[in-house]
């Protein structure tokens, strides 16, 4: 791997632990005003100091994120579809020139293995890998977005392996039974998405299990920004990812921090 590529990848996957907490707020690219992201700048601002990487679109990056931030950016560069249409019918939405201008550490696109449009998405990915590699920018393949996608180890393993074979530097997928098989068969690092909002205890278990079975981190969105207490949640997730904290201890931490937050806001509203 060349120096620039390795350097950018180490902005994302932290060399001291070999892990990463990516904060995903790119949902609007096909979901529009997602719950919790109505004002993305406001949502992201208090979370930034706990995120190793921010994953989002160039529109939100430009209009809602302070350019003085030192948080590395993974830019979503695929889209062109909405929740109302066929999600798999994506194309590339950002030129590499603009990605470089935005000083990104990585670029991300979705692939739709198993869909009638799988070839299109895989060829888009191969093209992106070619272009990004020219600039030393790592590519992240996002697998299995969309509710019609099966999320078992066989399918996710297939999608992750194909992405790796076509040259991406890392892959995002979902945690599932037999997750260790996906890891065994994928020669590049794997991060797990959080998926739909679930109780904090379950999201922390998901993160813990994913890490235990070999994921290098999470690329988590809704289970952080839709939590009643997003900052305590991302801090608890960080402990699981970087310090191998158990899900039970992380939940205790979340509850303690959430309680402190509530006390603070009660004091504020009294004054
Ligand atoms: C798909 O909409 C995006 O790539 C999200 O970034 C991804 O699904 C992770 O977010 P969440 O944890 O909310 O699933």
Image (cartoon, helix red, strand yellow):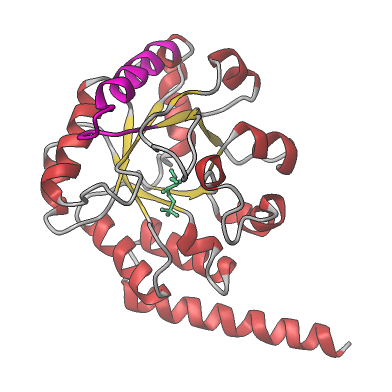
Q: Which residues are magenta?
A: 110-131
Q: From the viewer's perspective, is residue 53 above or below residue 107?
A: below
Task: Report if residue 126 lies within the magenta region.
Answer: yes
Position of residue 131 measured from the top left corner of the image (x, y, whole percent): 44, 11
Residue 71 picture location, percent across and down: 60, 41
Choose between 241 and 127: the one closer to the eye: 127
Residue at image location 62% in from the left, 32% down from the top: 58
x 31%, y 20%: residue: 120
Residue 180 in picture, x, y percent from top left: 14, 51
Q: Residue at x 72, y 43 (%)?
A: 64
Please identify the quadrant where the C terminus is shown.
Answer: bottom right
Name the residue nearer the viewer: 19 or 187: 187
Asked whether 262 falls inside the magenta stretch, the response is no
Vertical placement of residue 245 versus 41, above or below: below
Residue 141 spot, x, y in % from top left: 34, 32
Q: Identify the residue shown where x is 46% and y is 63%.
A: 223
For residue 186, say whether it is visible.
Answer: no
Is 90 on the left-hand or right-hand side of 26?
left
State whether the magenta stretch is mostly helix, strand or loop: helix
């Amino acid at each position: 791997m060349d120096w620039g590529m390795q350097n950018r990848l180490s902005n994302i996957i932290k060399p001291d632990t070999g892990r990463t907490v990516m904060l995903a707020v790119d949902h609007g690219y096909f979901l529009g005003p997602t719950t919790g992201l109505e004002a993305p700048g406001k949502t992201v601002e208090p979370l930034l100091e706990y995120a190793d990487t921010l994953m989002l679109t160039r529109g939100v990056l430009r209009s809602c994120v302070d350019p003085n931030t030192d948080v590395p950016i993974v830019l979503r560069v695929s889209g062109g579809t909405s929740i109302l249409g066929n999600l798999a019918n994506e194309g590339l939405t950002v030129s590499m020139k603009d990605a470089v201008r935005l000083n990104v550490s990585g670029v991300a696109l979705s692939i739709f293995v198993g869909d009638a449009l799988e070839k299109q998405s895989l060829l888009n990915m191969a093209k992106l890998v070619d272009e990004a590699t020219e600039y030393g920018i790592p590519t992240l393949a996002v697998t299995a977005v969309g509710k019609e996608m099966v999320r078992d180890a066989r399918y996710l393993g297939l999608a992750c392996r194909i992405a790796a074979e076509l040259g991406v530097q890392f892959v995002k997928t979902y945690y599932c039974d037999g997750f260790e098989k996906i890891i065994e068969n994928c020669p590049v690092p794997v991060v797990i998405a959080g998926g739909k909002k679930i109780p904090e205890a379950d999201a922390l278990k998901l993160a813990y299990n994913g890490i235990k079975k070999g994921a290098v981190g999470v690329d988590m969105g809704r289970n952080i920004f839709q939590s009643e207490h997003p900052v305590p949640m991302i801090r608890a997730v960080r402990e699981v990812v970087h310090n191998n904290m158990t899900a039970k201890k992380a939940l205790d931490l979340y509850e303690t921090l959430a309680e402190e937050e509530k006390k603070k806001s009660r004091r504020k509203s009294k004054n």
